[in-house]
Amino acid sequence: MFQKGSFINSYKIFLLKIYLCNNFYSLIFITFIVKMLRKTILFDLNHNEMLDIDFSDFSDLSKLLQNLNLKIKKNENKDLTKKLLENVDVLVLGNPIDDYFSNIEIKDIVNYVRTGGNLILVSEYGADFLQKTNLNDIAPNFGILFEKNLIKDSNNHNRSSILHIQNFPKNNFINGLREVVIGGTCSLFLNKGAKPLLQTDQNNFWSEIFNSSTEEWIKDKEQQHTIAAYSEFGQGKVVAFGDIDIFCSDDNIGINTLDNQKFLHNIFTWLTDPVKRSDVMSFILEQIGQVQNNVKEIHKTMNNVIETMSILEKRLRHLEENQDSL
């Protein structure tokens, strides 16, 4: 005999199984999509960089990147080429020492950023001069230069190289910070539209330059110094730091100190967001303007050369006429 209640219960169980099955496959699909959309961050180690993400000193940085759903990769023994940088969203050159980037690598790095890649450059006190590398063959393409100095704070009783930054420039991605701590940094010189991320106050901060003959640090300039900066270049972005310690797990100057982690969180989030189309167009127009200015300068130089040749031609003709008259 047909039992209506039994049929309805079986039907409900059948629908539940379909629902659970659909949700199971939906979950698999969503997980797959999330993995596909993960951004990749590549740490270069082929130039003897100090920022090795697998070192215990950078374990908290690794956790932050994982929390941001970034896929971490390392390059340990290959030159940086266009092919190697394919599908890399952020490239990190974390304080290379005793090694140099080739001209071909530099060209490919610049093109990588221009076409949508993002770059983090990290130096240390003394910059290329003490670190014996050539980040300054890369950074100026983006309006940034690492200066060969060490920044100190006279407010500290011991005139320490540990800097406490409490005033921040206004922009869209580092708001809400109260204090960031940086230790042992060089300063950055900016042009070509590069902008400061971290700056010292106007007073009580000075730079010291290393004298290789006496092997001593000599006081140089007491002024405001930029110690971290950013730039937008084509479809990509660049962030530069004058010190590596903010990435480490040191309790006094590392990632877990005050607002350091929040600062880095904002930086990585900004880097992995696409550049606005309007900003790209502004970059293209700026590049066209520079080309036009260069053409004008070349035209001016050629006119000067032509004018000089005309004057020389007249003088030669005058000398020939004088010789004929003799």
Image: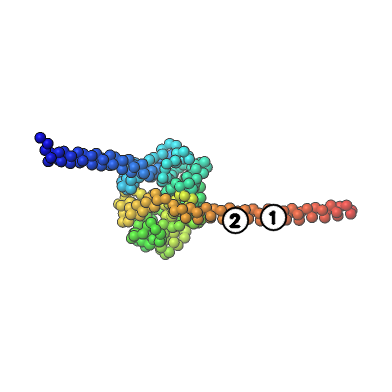
The kind of residue tagged 2 is Asn
Label 2 CA crowd tier, 10 Å (few <14, some 14–19, many 20+): few
Farthest residue toward the top? Answer: 1
Q: Does residue 32 appear to the left or right of 7 in the view shown?
A: right
- Alpha carbon distance from label 2 to label 1: 15 Å
Most foreground residue, 20 or 63: 20
Task: Point out the residue furthest to the front here.
Answer: 1
Asked if residue 126 lies left or right of residue 14, the reply is: right
Relative image position of residue 172 (x, y in whole percent): 39, 58
Which image quarter holds the N terminus?
top left
Please report the residue visible at 41 percent of the width from the left and 45 percent of the height from the top: 89
Question: Label 1 sits on what residue type?
Answer: Asn
Q: Say the numbered circle drawn on residue 203.
A: none
Give me the residue at 47% from left, 59% from top: 220
Q: Using residue 253 as the reference point, say whether residue 107 is left or right of it.
A: right
* Residue 204 % position (x, y): 41, 63
Specify the quadrant of the image occupied by residue 74. top left
Picture coordinates of residue 152 (x, y %)?
Answer: 40, 58
Can you tell which mark lies on residue 303? 1
Q: Residue furthest bottom?
A: 203
Quadrant in the rendering for residue 43: top left
- Label 2: which residue? 293
Depicted 137 relative to depicted 222: above or below: above
Residue 97 visible somewhere in the drawing: yes
